[in-house]
């Protein structure tokens, strides 16, 4: 099994919806940040990637047919080289909408000082939380690196978001790329992947209002409920 679809869109652009859609279309399991939270033992590969060390991408994505969201989207160019037959889906949404959604969800997800203290008190009793410590570091670093510590500067963050999207558009051959808004439904995605359109609506997940409860559960030591879906 090898990656067939590479998600190159930033978080909060419908990446979990796209994951569920790809799995429904036969391109699953799909690797998503929730998979890393469910299988934190794979974090070593991501630590290598961020450190600029060689990464065994086939080993990291062993058993997966697609990927979306953090942290994979950050390495879309490396993944294109590692999986030359894979297609690339750039999920997008209007920049202002993306910023407001990201600001109220993923930007607030890393634990603050008091939350870190609470987590420390739970560590002796929670193997899962102990395994999640390097994952928290990866998530915090990724968001900080992308936006250079200036995410609260709305104009700067939006400019970086648009710059990243344009880099994908410029860097991926047109025949391998779909620029996709999940609001457009099944049609563009199914046509691009060459599969039949399913009956029924697109799946929808990770509404903004649901995000705080999910993150609080993870920080309390419970793995996310959305996890790897096997054939």
Image (tube, rainbow, N blue to C red):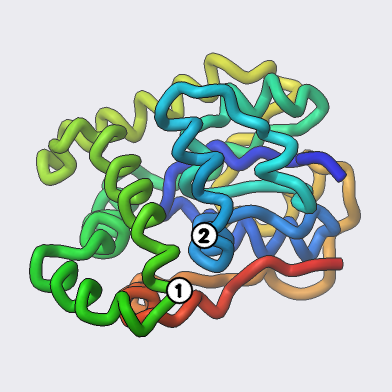
- Position of residue 202 in the picture relative to residue 42 (left or right): right
Q: Residue 208: which quarter of the image?
A: bottom left
| Residue 57 numbered mark, or none | none
Residue 4 drawn at (x, y percent): 79, 40
Asked if residue 115 shows in the view, the reply is yes
Which of the 4 image quarters holds residue 191? Answer: top right
Q: Is residue 132 left or right of residue 55?
A: left
In the rendered image, the vertical position of residue 14 relative to residue 207, given as above or below: above
Residue 68 image position (x, y, % from top left)? 58, 48
Compared to 35, does 43 lie above or below? above
Task: Give the SS element for disc 1.
Answer: helix
Q: Which residue is mark 2?
A: 40
Q: Which residue sits at x=90%, y=55%? A: 196
Above-or-below relation of 47 to 127: above
Q: Quadrant of residue 122?
A: bottom left
Mark 2 or mark 1: whose residue is earlier in sequence: 2
x and y, in percent, of residue 143 in the image: 30, 43
Task: Give neighbour class at mark 1: few <14, some 14-19, many 20+ (Cα, 10 Å).
Answer: some
Instruction: Give the spatial CA distance, label 2 vs label 1.
Output: 8 Å
Mark 2 vs 1: CB contact within 8 A: yes
Helix, strand, or loop for circle 2? helix
Where does the image place residue 58, in percent across and percent down from the top left?
74, 36
Asked whether residue 213 is in view, the answer is: no
- Residue 128, label in figure: 1
201 w.r.t. 66: above or below:
below
Residue at horizontal 56 percent and vertical 16 percent from the top: 171
Quadrant of the snapshot with the C terminus: bottom right
Question: Which quadrant: the N terminus?
Answer: top right
Residue at 52%, 59% in the rendered image: 40
Residue closer to the observer: 23 or 143 = 143
């Amino acid at each position: 099994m090898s990656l067939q679809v590479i998600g190159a869109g930033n978080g909060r652009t419908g990446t979990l919806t796209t994951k569920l859609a790809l799995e429904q279309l036969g391109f699953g399991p799909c690797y998503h940040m929730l998979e890393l939270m469910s299988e934190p033992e794979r974090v070593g590969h991501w630590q290598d990637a961020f450190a600029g060390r060689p990464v065994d991408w086939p080993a990291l994505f062993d058993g997966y047919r697609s990927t979306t969201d953090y942290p994979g989207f950050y390495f879309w160019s490396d993944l294109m080289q590692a999986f030359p037959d894979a297609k690339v889906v750039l999920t997008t949404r209007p920049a202002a909408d993306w910023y407001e959604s990201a600001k109220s969800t993923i930007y607030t997800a890393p634990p603050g000082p008091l939350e870190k203290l609470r987590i420390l008190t739970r560590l002796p009793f929670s193997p899962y939380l102990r395994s999640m410590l390097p994952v928290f570091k990866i998530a915090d670093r990724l968001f900080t690196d992308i936006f250079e510590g200036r995410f609260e500067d709305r104009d700067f963050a939006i400019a970086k978001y648009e710059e990243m999207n344009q880099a994908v558009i410029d860097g991926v051959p047109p025949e391998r790329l779909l620029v996709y808004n999940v609001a457009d439904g099944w049609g563009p995605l199914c046509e691009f992947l060459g599969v039949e359109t399913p009956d029924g609506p697109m799946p929808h997940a990770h509404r903004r209002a649901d995000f705080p409860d999910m993150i609080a559960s993870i920080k309390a030591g419970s793995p996310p409920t959305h996890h790897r879906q096997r054939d």
